[in-house]
Image (cartoon, grey):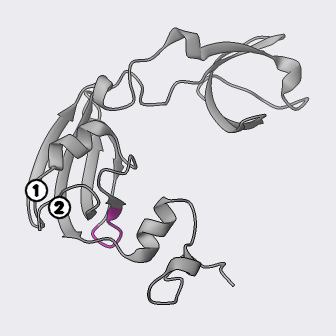
Amino acid sequence: MEIKDKSYVTINYTLKLDSGETIDQTTPEEPFGFVFGSGQVIKGLEDGIKGKKAGDSVSLTISPEDAYGESREDLVREIPRSNFPEGMDIEPGMPFEAQSPHGPVRFTVKEVNDDMVKADFNHPLAGQTLHFDIDIVDVREPSFAEMANLAGGCGCDTDPQGGCGTCGGCS
C-alpha cells in the first residue's frame, strides 16, 4: 500500500541538524506512527514520504519553511521576573511550560536579569534545516481508535464494532 491521505504510517527515523548533531531518533522497538495528512507531522516530512511503501528508505533535507518556520523576533518577549517563583534559579537555555488563559505555552529562556526574563516562544527547531533518514516500517488503513483519537475523542458511541479500541476512559 502506498502512503496517501488517511493512511496509518509507521516509520523509524533519525533526525539531525546541519551541524550533524542527532537530536531525535526512534528505535526498532518503538517506531513512530501517525495518520498521514492529518497535520500530526511537519509538511516537509509528509511531502517527502508521500507515495512511498513499507520497506522504502528515504533521506530528506527539510527547510525551515516546511518544518517549524523561521525564527520570529515577535515571538521573543520580556516577562517580569516577578511572574516566576521567588528564589527559582532561571538560566538561559532553560525550557519552561506555563499556563496561559488559552492553555499551556512553552518557551525557552534567552536572557535573565534582576527584573526581566527574555522568553523565546518560537518552536525550539524554528529556523533550523532538518535532516531525516527514514525507514518506512508499515503503511495500512488506520484503526477506528486511531481515527477517533485524531478527532480528540474516543468515538465509543459510533464504533461499528461496539468497542473503544485502545482509547480507554469510555464507559
In the rendered structure, which disc, 2 or 1, sits on the residue that comes first in sequence?
1
For residue 143, say whether it is visible.
yes
Q: Residues within 10 Å of mark 1 (few under 14, many from 20)?
A: some
Horizontal arrangement in the rendering, residue 16 relative to residue 1 (left or right): right
Label 1 secondary element:
loop
* Residue range of the region highlighted in magenta in the rendering: 28-33
Horizontal arrangement in the rendering, residue 112 relative to residue 121 (left or right): right
Question: Comparing marks 2 and 1, which lies closer to the viewer?
Answer: 1
Of residues 156 and 48, the one drawn nearer to the viewer in this rendering: 156
Q: Amino acid at mark 1?
A: Lys
Q: Is residue 97 magenta?
A: no
Q: Position of residue 131 (x, y in %)?
A: 22, 37
Q: Residue at x 66, y 35 (%)?
A: 105
Q: Residue at x 37, y 51 (%)?
A: 38
Q: CA distance from mark 2 to mark 1?
A: 8 Å
Q: Residue at x 49, y 81 (%)?
A: 159
Q: Residues within 10 Å of mark 2 (few under 14, many from 20)?
A: many
Q: Position of residue 152 (x, y in %)?
A: 56, 60
Q: Which quadrant of the structure image shows residue 74? A: top right
Q: Position of residue 85 (x, y in %)?
A: 87, 32
The residue that mark 1 highlights is 52
Label 2 secondary element:
strand
Q: Which quadrant of the structure image shows residue 143? A: bottom left
Q: Looking at the picture, does residue 53 appear above or below residue 58?
A: below
The residue that mark 2 highlights is 136
If the image is split into quadrants, where does the N terminus sit? bottom left
- The rendered magenta stretch, by its main secondary structure, is classed as loop
